[in-house]
Image (cartoon, rainbow, N blue to C red):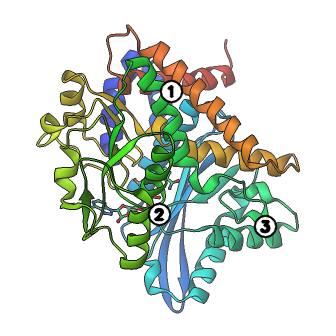
Amino acid sequence: MTFAKVKKFLEKVSPLAGITPEEKIILETPQKILQAELEVSGKRYPAFRVQFNNARGPFKGGIRFHPEVDLDEVQSLAFWMTLKTAVADIPLGGGKGGVRVNPKELSKAELEELSRKYVRAFYQDLGPEKDVPAPDVYTTPEIMGWMLDEFEKLTGTKAPGFITGKPLELGGSKVRDIATALGGVYVLEEAAAKLKLEGKRAAIQGFGNAGMNMAKLLREAGYTIIAVSDSKGGAYDAEGLDVDKVIQFKEQQGTIKGFPEGKDISNEELLELDVDILVPAALSGVITENNATKVKAKIVLELANGPTTPEADEILHQNNILVLPDVLANAGGVTVSYFEWYQNQHQQVWDEETVKTKLREKMVAAFGQLWTAYDGSGHDFRTATYVHAIKKVIAAERGRRLRS
Ligand code: NAD
């Protein structure tokens, strides 16, 4: 979503949150924009860090390495992080970073140099109590390790809470690898209970970190996965796919397409299957006004960021389909990032069960608050979610301003 669209969105939602025009300006204005050019092997790569809002705590958000990164995108993502940390009810604000680069074209040594130079460019504005980055598209735990090392060298400190998504041996948290999907399962279970939905047939679009883990976890929770897909296509079996075999096939073949124990299915067809739960877990903008009328699921769980266009969202709402929006559905990732930061700041190491229990508590509580805001409000669940988040950010802003 472009930043112009973010502003348009705020135009619509902020009156419902009861905020003043001045407060709307605060909400749509990033607090600080950092920019640099990073030189590696004679090439220069534009780099950004947008610190959107820290009224509720230090800025928090990933760093993306991608050829299409630009300031407008980073700014929009930083805005959504501000709402996501508010929805998850963790004491952090919103930020995002990025470098316009195709990391696949860099050698490992160049990638490390780029990562370290990113930290060198911005480290004075980063830190465990200022701004805490994390991985995002094409950035990995290994990159987080290099960035941590660079930050500690520059500052002469030991500061593992500077960055999250680190390898376990550098202070990473258990469960971080599956946190997004696991948080999604906890939210889904709460929503299904509210709707008294008994059907357990699910289709998942995308088979990366979010989608593949979701398939495994839903299967463990007793769901039947009738279709999954990746960028090349999908596999379908009305009786349910054997998820372990699909994973094995994907690992061997690099794709799901052609999975011998299922029928081939396109990504478009997957969205229109007769299922109870639809999980978009790949790209944004896949459910549009053109296909929304054909969605048959009772619940759409947005593990991907922004998979439903505003026009489609309206259609789904009219058709009585509950859409669990990305800022809630995939907030398990940032919640366990918060746990990682917390453990680092308090010299603690939690075991797997502790992290899972705390994640469940956070996601159930977040869902409960939103359901209360939604139920009987007359708004759709997404609007109720955004209004709730905006109110929380503005309440923190109000608490900080002098009253005369
Ligand atoms: P990933 O790179 O691990 O996996 C992406 C998957 O999407 C791959 O299986 C890929 O084949 C598939 N894909 C690509 N193009 C596709 C297409 N046209 N149709 C169907 N599938 C396609 O990424 P991820 O970490 O799983 O992230 C997926 C989504 O979840 C993104 O929108 C991301 O922003 C969001 N998300 C992820 C996390 C996380 O912790 N991983 C957290 C929050 C949000």
| Whether label 2 touches label 1, CB < 8 Å | no
Ligand 1: give its quadrant.
bottom left
Q: Is mark 1 within 8 Å of ligand 1?
A: no
Q: Mark 1 points at which residue?
A: 389
Q: Assign a secondary structure to mark 1.
A: helix
Nearer to us in this view, 82 or 192: 192
Q: Of marks 1 and 3, which one's residue comes earlier in the chain? A: 3
> In the rendered structure, which amino acid carries the disc numbered 3?
Glu
> In the rendered structure, which amino acid carries the disc numbered 1?
Ala
Q: Dot 3, crowdedness within 10 Å: few (<14), some or many (≥20)?
A: few
Q: Assign a secondary structure to mark 3.
A: helix
> In the rendered structure, which amino acid carries the disc numbered 2?
Val
Q: Of marks 3 and 2, which one's residue comes earlier in the chain? A: 2
Nearer to us in this view, 350 or 224: 224
Q: Is residue 102 visible?
A: yes
> Percent from the top left, x then y, of residue 302?
38, 41
Query: Disc 3 to disc 2, how far (Cα)?
Result: 22 Å
What is the residue that sits farthest to the bottom in this orientation?
41
Q: Which mark is residue 169?
A: 3
User: Which residue corresponds to the image point at 78% horizontal and 60% vertical from the top-left?
Assistant: 171
In the displayed structure, does residue 318 sit left or right of residue 128?
left
Please tell me whether residue 196 is drawn above or below residue 345 in the rendered image: above
Query: Disc 2 to disc 1, how far (Cα)?
Result: 25 Å
Q: Name the residue under label 2.
A: 137
Q: Does the residue labelled 2 lie within 8 Å of ligand 1?
A: yes
User: Which residue corresponds to the image point at 73% horizontal and 50% vertical from the top-left?
Assistant: 340
